[in-house]
Structures are given as structure tokens and as C-alpha cells.
Amino acid sequence: MSQRDSIWRNMDKPLVLMYLLLMAMGWANIYSAAYDPEHANLFDRAREYGAQSVWIVASLLIGAAMLLVRGEFIRNLAYPVYAFVLLLLVLVLLVGREVNGAKAWFGVGGFGIQPAEFSKFATSLALSSYLSGLKTLKEARSRVVAATLILLPVGLIMLQPDTGTALVSAAFVLVLYREGLSGNILLIAILAAILVVLSLIMKESVYSIPFTGTEVHGQYFLIFLLAVFCLLIFLFVRKFVLKHRRKRIYVYLLAVLLGSAAFISSVDHLVDRMPAHQQTRIRVLLGLEYDPRGFGYNVEQSKTAIGSGGLLGKGFLNGTFTKYKYVPMQSTDFIFCTVGEEWGFVGSAVVVLLFGALILRCIQISDRQRSRFTRIYAYCVASIFFLHLMINVGMAIGLAPVIGIPLPFFSYGGSSLIGFTILLAILVRLDAERLEVLR
Amino acid sequence: MNLDERKYVLIGGVLFICVVFVLRLFWIQVVDQHWAARAADISERKITVFPSRGLIIDRHGELLVANTPVYDIMVVPREVKGLDTLGLSQLLNVPMDQVRERLRKAAEYSVWKPSEFEKQITAGQYAAISVQLYKYPGFYAQSRTLRTYPPHVGAHMLGYISEVNARQVERDPYYKPGDMIGVGGLESYYEKELRGRRGVKYVVVDVHNNIQGSFNGGEFDTLAHAGKNLYTSIDLQLQSLGERLMQHKKGSIVALDPKTGEVLALVSSPAYDPELLTGRVRNSNYRILQQDSLRPLFDRALQAQYPPGSIFKLAQAAIALQEGVINLNTGFPCNKALVGCHNHPYAANVEQAVQFSCNPYFYQVFKREVEQGAAKNRFEDAALGLAKWKTAMESFGLGHPPHLDLPAVKGGSIPGVSFYNRIYGEKAWSFSTIYSLSIGQGEVLVAPVQMANLAAIFANRGYYYDPHLVRAIGSPDSLNMHVQRHHTMVDDQWFPPLVEGMRRVVNEPGGTARQARIPGITVCGKTGTAQNPHGKDHAVFIAFAPMDDPKIAIAVYVENSGFGGTWAAPIASLCMEQYLTDTITRPDLMQRMLEADLIATEGNYTKFVSKRRKQ
Ligand SMILES: [Zn+2]
């Protein structure tokens, strides 16, 4: 039995099928978004779809090549690849081409390469490699190493600056959690997020504290509310909880209250020091400011494009709202608008569900691995796709902040396409070897 | 602790996000129609394609009314950036506060769609504006056409166009607010032919407001049809001459081609430059014209009704001959006790009576017409006679509006039995009550166009065609106008002697209109002077020429000018000469007529007109 037969027989066909399907849909969308009757040729370099066609062919070739690489080889190459991508990220800061204020590109002929897109699979490989060698994540040293692996590329990407791509690394928190990081960290993160949102919303108004007649700013009122809440718990605990457990709970309560108060004050402080346009962006996101021509404009336009698609959409090449440039960045960050407008609710729901299926499939694949490395890597892949789906589609439909990250296989751009292809191809290859690898 | 279960956090997250996203998509795409409406509002435009309005052309192909491009400055509020209000105010000559106010209104209407900012800038003004306009993003020019009048004549008969009012929009669903509609004259009468049919194009525009293509492949578009040209019978040379001759005078000239009923000229004076009622200046000029004491907006050729004076005697004589109450050789002495007269030789027959325009003669003629002895009672007899007379008179196109293709044509008045019964009571009036009708005074009223028609009847020796201005619509070859020929109740045989009388009026010693002679052409005519209780008498002269092959019939009415031969006859003569020979052989006479100012003391109207014309 030749190696080719083995990979063909053992590779996860549903995953590959979903990949090909998403790529085909993505390509059709790019074609439509940038369609120009005078340059209808699929490979016409004058239009974005011409370039994208080239990238797709390149991705397929690279993806196929990756399938032929032995898993052993990939695992051994995890750190060198990671190191190489770090080197690229440093280099791009030195000799990169600046586009839209970010030094994120290497120019290669007419095509540009964004090394940040490769950091996703590189970090995944390195993290998988490191975590698979650990028994537990409880030691402080291993936590520091894991965090460093994640934050090194993040730091470099932030220097470009490309906040969107850097933010995707939050996906790795999910991986760490899965691998044993205390759930409290995740919980505290979520709690903090809620507090941030609440304090920002309440910051806008003045409240009066009941029975005192005192009027205070929202953020202090929030602290006041928390204090009342803690007091109620304190009374509850004193009445119903056994004496020897109370002390511990009191400490927790006090810590939460003081921590929250400090956190709220610092958020308040930070926001006040932010540049005006960023403050506005936050306020628009929270629905505190309706500003269709300013920062909320993109989202307003995006929602209009998607909303105008109706149930079945306007049809292929008929998405006039997106085609006539009403949506900014409509072939990259806001590509989902074209989906929504041309294919309607049915089409966009299919795309969302297809992504959901892809992520769940990755989790399923992760589950069936005997190799820890592959299991962690698969989970990395699932988390990365999850974050991209959540943020990109979320922002297009007005549920997430406007953060510039691509929708995998849909957004125009070769680096992300190749990056995601490699990410998936490695997974398919590793998974195909699940029966022969015992480690 | 089993870490395996932690995967459910991610699985749950994925499922949660998918459900939330799908619900959200369902909400904005299927349930909430607001977004679809917003997309259409922003990216689709209904463009009205205004057809060019038909031109109005004279009988020799000269343009009377044409179209000229003007420019509207449009604004798309969303695209306005860093507006230099002062600069724009100066460029467009719009006050600063107006600039802000209009911008606010435009934004109120729509920030995406263009609104009119300043209307109807002429091509000349636009040339200066266009080179600066790029400095004002969000503003652009849109061309449309305006009426223009190359020869600057014929304001009354041509009419003008104006924006439709609310009532017109309500009455005719074709019109939308902002449309133009013909008001008065040919513009109004032939509105449907001239306007053509509006087309509508639905287009999709991009974010920069550039048209990117038709909506739904043009499925809902309709084509515009250009308005049809009007080929009129007006002779521009004659019309212009008529208007010039009538300057500084009140009155009118109507010239017809008796063989067809075609109107050759229709002059009402004081006239005004039709350009005054175009474009941006229309409203202010209209107000000025409206307040002028000389009433320049009043179309005297069609709407003024005057006592006809002695020209009425022609019809009186014809009817008397037909009814046999006189014969060709009937003579009456000039008995000034009956009715006043001037000194002249004895009128021994009808020809001479016409030539001398003897008032007592026609007193007698009318007496015989009215008192035919059909009834014993003097009053009953008069009623029977007058009824017969009125019917005959009406067959001369009098007493009812002519079928002229212009709006608001007055028909004058031939008083009848019921009229006098109403005033005096039944059997309470007789000939002696109504004798002043005999010489065209009293209750009889005739509009100038009817006077010209009277001349045409005598030119044709007994019949007339409905007077009309338009010979063809759409193409000059389609002479498609149906014109009715009307015979008078008087037999043809009675006309030649009266025509001979008209010849003598102009050409024989003792005639009242010897100033109307044209060298080499036999002119037939009749003067008239209508008493005016408010001032100097009105003068009228009707004529046709040449006698044996009449090509033009004309009526000239000059208010407050005294005797008809003095001003009306020479003006008619010059007009006929111009039309028949295309030259004026009497420059002195011409000069005298041009310079004559019969309303110098009244109003300041003519100065206003001449000042404006120089622009
Ligand atoms: Zn007499």
C-alpha cells in the first residue's frame, strides 16, 4: 500500500469536502463582489477575482503538498516553523511594505504576503508541541512558557499594528482552558467583559442613590450596586452557611468587591484617556450613539446590504448594494455582505452553519485522537475558526465590534487563504495518521 | 478532574453563536423590512426623462419658440464636505443664509438623493460657474431646457410655460409637482402635442451617485416621446412689423389669409418681450407686468371687445340687399337730423354709401331691416325684424367666439330680442330704441379677430374659414388641420358692389381711407370710429388686398386715436404691403407710424420693455 493510497483512504473526507465547498462559495463571492463585465475572465488580473483565482490554485497545490508530508516530520518541524514565522514577523517590521498604516506586507511581484496570517498555524503547531509534552498545566513555569508562545507573535503583530489578527490569538485561551487552565480565568475574563460593558453604558448617566438623595456618576453607582449585592450575599451566608466555611466566602466576597471597584475605576480612567475616535467606536458599538455617517457607518451599510437580500437574495452578480461600493471593504472584511445580499437568508444561514459544522468537525476529530499533539492541534484549529466566524460575521450583522479580520475562504487575500489551507491540511494529514501514531 | 468535558464549552459556544447568528440574519433579512427599504432608498433612483418640448415655427420655417439649455445646480448633502459657504454664496449669487437654509432643506429631504439647490442658470452664467464648481463636492449641474424666443415677438399668442400648480396636478394625473405646463396662447392650447410624453428610467447608482445601470434590466422603464413641433401660419416678418408699428399705441392687429382662414399675424399692444416670462425672472417680471396700468398681459386681439363703428355698415348693407329692403341703386339723403354725419356728396347708391360711410343712410337701411311690416304692432314688428337681422349678422362670424385654436377667445355680442326685452321689457322697445346699432355703436361688440374675419368675408365675397394658427403638427407636410368653411346668409351676388364700395373708400376721392393705398396694388377697406365715452374715440380699419385675388385680410384697431383713417389705415396699409411685396416703399409713412406715441402720458410701460429687451 503506497503512501498516497493511505492518505486518500484515511483522510477526513467531510472536512475536506467542507473546505472545498467553502472555498468554492468564497471564490464565487469574490467574483461577484468585484465583478466587472469588461473583465469577466476568471483569471483577469485587473480584478480581485483574477488574483484570488491564482491564490486558490496556489492554495490547492500547497494543501495537496502538505497532505504528502509525514506527520512525524510536521511534528518535528513545529518549533522551526514557529521560529521561522517569528523571523518573518520581525523582518516585516523592518523591510515590510506599509499598507493602510500597517507594516504587514512583503511585496512579491504583484502579490503581497502577510506573514501574520501564517502565525496562526505556526503558533498552533508550537503550542500543540509544547502542551503535548506536559503532564499538567498547573505549574507556573509551564503556564509562562505557553503564554510566551502565544504572546510572542501577538506582540510582533501588534507592532505592525494589526489589532484584528492579534486578537485572534484569544482563541488559544480556549485551547489552554481545554488543556487544564483554571476555568476561573475564563470566568473572570467573561465577568470583566460584562463589567466593562455595564460601566461604559452606565457611565453616560447620573443616578441617585435611593433614600440619600445623593447623585453619583454611573460607574460609582455600579460599584454601589455591587456592594449592595455583596452585602446581601454576606447576610445570606451568615444565616445559612456553616460557620467554618463562612470566613473563606467572606474573603472571596471582599476580593470580588474590591477587585471590581478597582477594575471599574481603571476602565473609566482608561476610556477617558482614549483618543476620541476610539471612544466613539466603543460608544457606537454599545448603542450609545447613533451615527450612520461616522463610525457606525460601516456596520449600518453592512446591515443594509445583508438585510436587502431578503429570504432568497438578489441572485449571483446581482448584489447591487455591495457591488456599487456602498459597503466599505466589501471584498475583504465585509465580504459576508455579498453573501447576505446575493444569497439571502438561506444562503447566509448555510454559510454560518457550514462554518459551525466545520468547527464541530474539528472538535470531533480532536476527540478521536490518540496523539495528544494532534488532539491539541485540532482544538487550536477549531478555536481559530470559531473566533473568525464570531468576530467577522458578528461585525457584519452588527453583533460584534468592527475588528478587521478576514472570513476564512471568503475574504479577498492570498495570505489568509494559504494560511487557513495549511492550517486545515496539517490537521487532515495528522488525523489520517491517527491509527498508526501511538504517541 | 476530567478535562475532556471542557470541550463542551467550545461546542456550546459554537452552537450558541450559530443559533444567534441565524436568528439575527432571519431578523434583519426576513422580518425587518427596514433594511431592504433603506438599500432601495440609497441605491435606486427614478430618473424622469423630460422630452424636449415641441418648437413653434412660422409659415416660412422661422423659429418663433425654441428651447435653450439651462442648468440647475443640484446638491447631494451626504457628499458635501468642507463647504465654503461664502464662496458658494458668491459663485451662485445666493445669500449666505439662503445657502444654509437650502442645504438644510435638502438634507431634510434626503442626504443620499440630489435636491435642487439653484434653478435655471443660463448657459452664459453657467460657463463661469462650471469652472469653479469642482471646489464644492456634493454640488453638480444638471441641464434642462427653457423656452426661448429668437425673434422676441408674439408673447400673447404664444403663451408661456410655468410650473404646474397644485390644482393642475390634481386634475390631470400626468403632471407631477415641478412639471412645466403651457399657460395661455398656443403653449396652452396645444399643451398635449407640445409636451410630448415623459419617460421614466429606474437606475441603480453607486456610492458616488454615478449611474451604474438600469434597475431590473429596464423592466419598469418607459420611453420619452419628444413633443411635436407646431407649424403655424404666422408670418414672422408681418408679426414683427405689426408689433413695431403698434408700439406706443394700445390696440391690436389681426391679419388673415382669407383663402384658408390662416392667421398671419396677431398683434396685441402694448406687447412685451416673451423672454420676460422665462426662467428665474418669470415671477418677478410677471408681477411687474400685472401691475402695469396699460395691462400688457391683456390680449387685445382676442379678448378686447369694441363697438365696431362704421365697419359694421358693410354687414348691414349686405343683409339689407339680401333681404331686399334696399337695392343696389337705393339712395338716401344725408339727413343729419337722424344721426350725425360728416360732409360728403349725396350717396346715390350702396357703393357710394359705403364709400362715404354716410350715417343717416345706414340709419335708413337698418330701419328698413328692422321694420319690415311683418307685424302690425310697431314693437312686434321691430322684434321680428331684429331677430332676423341677428341671425343674419351671426352668419358673418359675429356674436359668438370664432373657432380659433387659442384659449380664451371672446366672441363679442350681437344684441337680440331677448337682450332688449331684458332691458326695456317685452314690446317696450322699437327701432328708435336701437337705431345706434345701424352704425356699429351701442350694444354691439366685436373682437378684433372677428373684424379681420369680416374683411375676409368680403375678400372671399361671401364666406370665411375658421381662423386658425396651426397648419400642421409634428411635420410640416402633414397639413392635417380640418378647417370648416362657413357661408354667410347673404348670396354671393350682393358682395361685388360692396367690395367696389370698399375699393372706393381707399382709392377714390371722397373715400375715408385714402392713406391705405399701396402703390400698384388695389386695396379695399373700410374705416370705423367707435365712440368712446372714456376718452378719445377708438379707430378701426379693416381691409383686404389685392382686390381681385385677395391674399390678406386685416383689421387694425387703435384705441383712443380718433378717426380710423388717421392711424389705423396707414398701419394696415404698411402691413399689407410688407406681406404682399416683402418691402416697404414708403419709409416716411413708416417712420411716422413708428414714432407716433399715442400713450406717452400713460404709464411707463414701454420704457420698461425697451430696457429689458436690450439685455
Ligand atoms: Zn352722411
Image: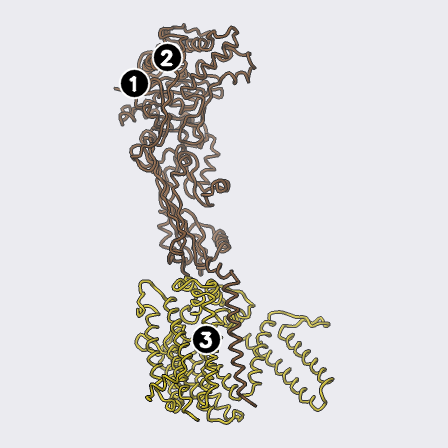
Q: Is mark 1 within 8 Å of ligand 1?
A: no
Density class for disc 3 (Cα within 10 Å; few <14, some 14-19, many ≥20) is many
* Residue B604 visible, this angle: no
Query: What distance separates the C-alpha of mark 2 from that of mark 3?
Result: 108 Å
The residue that mark 1 highlights is B547
Colour displayed for chain B in the image of the structure = brown
The residue that label 3 is drawn on is A355
Q: Is residue A385 left or right of residue B64?
A: right
Q: Are marks 2 and 3 in contact (CB under 8 Å)?
A: no
- Mark 2 residue crowding within 10 angstroms, few (<14) / some (14–19) / many (20+): many
In the depicted structure, whether residue A118 falls above or below residue B382: below
Residues indicated by labels 2 and 3 sit on the same polypeptide chain:
no
Between B21 and B398, the one lying in front of the other is B21
Give SS at disc 2: helix
- Which label is found at residue B181? none
Quadrant of the rendering where the C terminus of chain B is positioned: top left
Q: Position of residue A419 (x, y in %)?
A: 39, 80
Disc 1 element:
loop
Question: In terms of depth relative to the viewer, which is nearer, B22 or A129?
Answer: B22
Please tell me if label 3 and label 1 are on a single chain: no
Nearest the viewer among B11 and B36 is: B11
